[in-house]
């Protein structure tokens, strides 16, 4: 059986390869007295709140499990629209919101709608590996631009302008970013959008961690910059619904119909149960719970980052959102891949090497997730300290 050539352009997902190795070791006798602490996966330890679970049960008991519109349940689109107004002061009409089968589906839809064969799409190095693979799956060419700590590990307008060629179709950004937890300042985001628009390109911004911002200077949506920005969002991170596979995208009005046509053919519609459950996410009691959790994530960051610095695992830029720390291990090892597996075996702490996230300086870095509880983080730091 001959495989499609596009598979040659899609690397293995090393995050998951490391995760499999950590799970295998965790079930071995070596971890019997010292269970593995998993700081490698970007999944909140919090689950969906009771109100969301209750809504899902009522949905199933009431038999509301049929297909919805490909663009999503109208009431959910309206709820998301109100959330933008209340949280960000933005007027985002429900008609521009398309509910998707996770943010991954939204990114796939955006790339299939906008990327032609051979088109180049600019993105920062480091960045989330699946984002460049969505481009490759649409037969585009991801172009990684080195982004230093001085740039907050993000693209800037000057870099976009310098890298733009006749083959460039647009940019794919993430703010806050996985793996660095850093965001693009609103002023710089505006300059990037203007630079791209002047060249007839598209701006896609992955904002799945936006509601987990900790710094008001970076907590604005890119949608505030222009009506032609395509924003990707998710119920997985702030709303703690990872396995429900539900997300959304905000697109210009002219893009709604093409996106709908793709969604109809690729997956019919998002999960109806997940959509009905997600309506409860926007109830005042649920929002209050999510805000309590956001404060807990911030407290974990404020503990972990200084602790890593003290261990010689420098975090060059304080993360302003999400739940990741991007730490430089070069003081201890030449390869973050070797360092991660060494800590997995000796400290029983699973972390993610930087190999997935870029081709430049990422080999020096590891990503640690502080989506685990404070006691787990404290124990992990003690183990790392002893091993180092």
Image: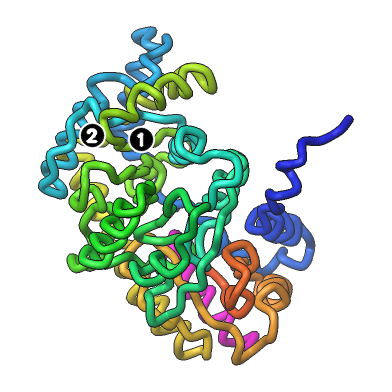
Mark 2 Cα-neighbour bin, 10 Å: few <14, some 14–19, many ≥20: many
Nearest the camera: 362 or 284? 362
Please give the name of the residue rendered at 51% of the width and 78% of the height, measured from the top-left corner: 327
Task: Give the CA distance from mark 2 to mark 1.
Answer: 9 Å
Mark 1 Cα-neighbour bin, 10 Å: few <14, some 14–19, many ≥20: many
Q: Is residue 222 visible?
A: yes
Quarter containing the C terminus: bottom right
Residue 296 placement (x, y as % from top left)? 30, 62
Give the residue pinned by disc 2.
80
Give the residue pinned by disc 1.
248
Quadrant of the rendered structure where residue 293 is?
A: bottom left
**Left or right of residue 45: residue 21:** right
* Tag count: 2
Residue 284 placement (x, y as % from top left)? 15, 39
Residue 333 on the magenta span: no
Residue 376 on the magenta span: yes
Please give the name of the residue rendered at 26% of the width and 53% of the height, measured from the top-left corner: 222
Q: Secondary structure at mark 1?
A: strand
* Majority SS type along the magenta span: helix
Q: Is residue 245 visible?
A: no
Quadrant of the rendered structure where residue 34 is?
A: bottom right
Q: Which residues are magenta?
A: 370-388
């Amino acid at each position: 059986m001959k495989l499609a050539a596009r598979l040659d352009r899609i690397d293995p997902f090393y995050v998951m390869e490391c995760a499999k190795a950590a799970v295998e070791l965790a079930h071995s006798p070596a971890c019997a007295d010292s269970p593995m602490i998993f700081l490698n996966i970007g999944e909140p330890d919090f689950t969906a709140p009771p109100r969301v679970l209750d809504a899902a049960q009522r949905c199933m008991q009431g038999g509301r499990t049929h297909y919805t519109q490909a663009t999503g349940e109208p009431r959910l689109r309206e709820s998301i629209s109100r959330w933008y107004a209340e949280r960000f002061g933005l007027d985002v009409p429900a008609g521009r919101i398309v509910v998707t089968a996770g943010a991954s589906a939204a990114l796939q839809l955006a790339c299939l709608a906008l990327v032609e064969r051979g088109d180049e799409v600019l993105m920062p190095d480091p960045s989330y590996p699946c984002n460049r693979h969505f481009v490759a799956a649409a037969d585009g060419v991801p172009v990684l631009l080195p982004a230093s700590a001085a740039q907050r590990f993000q693209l800037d307008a000057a870099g976009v302008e310098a890298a733009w060629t006749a083959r460039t179709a647009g940019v794919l950004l993430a703010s806050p970013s996985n793996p660095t937890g850093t965001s693009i300042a609103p002023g710089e985001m505006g300059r990037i959008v203007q630079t791209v628009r002047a060249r007839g390109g598209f701006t896609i911004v992955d904002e799945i961690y936006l509601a987990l911002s900790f710094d008001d200077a970076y907590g604005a949506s890119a949608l505030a910059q222009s009506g032609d920005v395509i924003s990707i969002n998710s119920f997985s991170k702030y709303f703690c619904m990872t396995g429900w596979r539900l997300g959304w995208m905000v697109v210009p009005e002219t893009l709604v119909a093409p996106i709908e046509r793709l969604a109809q053919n690729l997956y019919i519609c998002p999960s109806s149960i997940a959509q009905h459950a997600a309506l409860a996410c926007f109830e005042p009691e649920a929002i209050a719970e999510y805000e309590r959790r956001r404060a807990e994530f911030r407290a974990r960051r404020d503990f972990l980052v200084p602790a890593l610095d003290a261990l010689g695992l420098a975090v060059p830029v304080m993360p302003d959102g999400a739940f990741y720390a991007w730490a430089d291990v070069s003081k201890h090892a030449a390869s973050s891949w070797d360092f991660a597996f060494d800590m997995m075996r000796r400290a029983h702490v699973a972390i993610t090497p930087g190999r997935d996230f870029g081709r430049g300086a990422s080999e020096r870095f590891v990503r640690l997730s502080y989506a685990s509880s404070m006691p787990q983080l404290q124990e992990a730091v003690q183990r790392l300290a002893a091993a180092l």
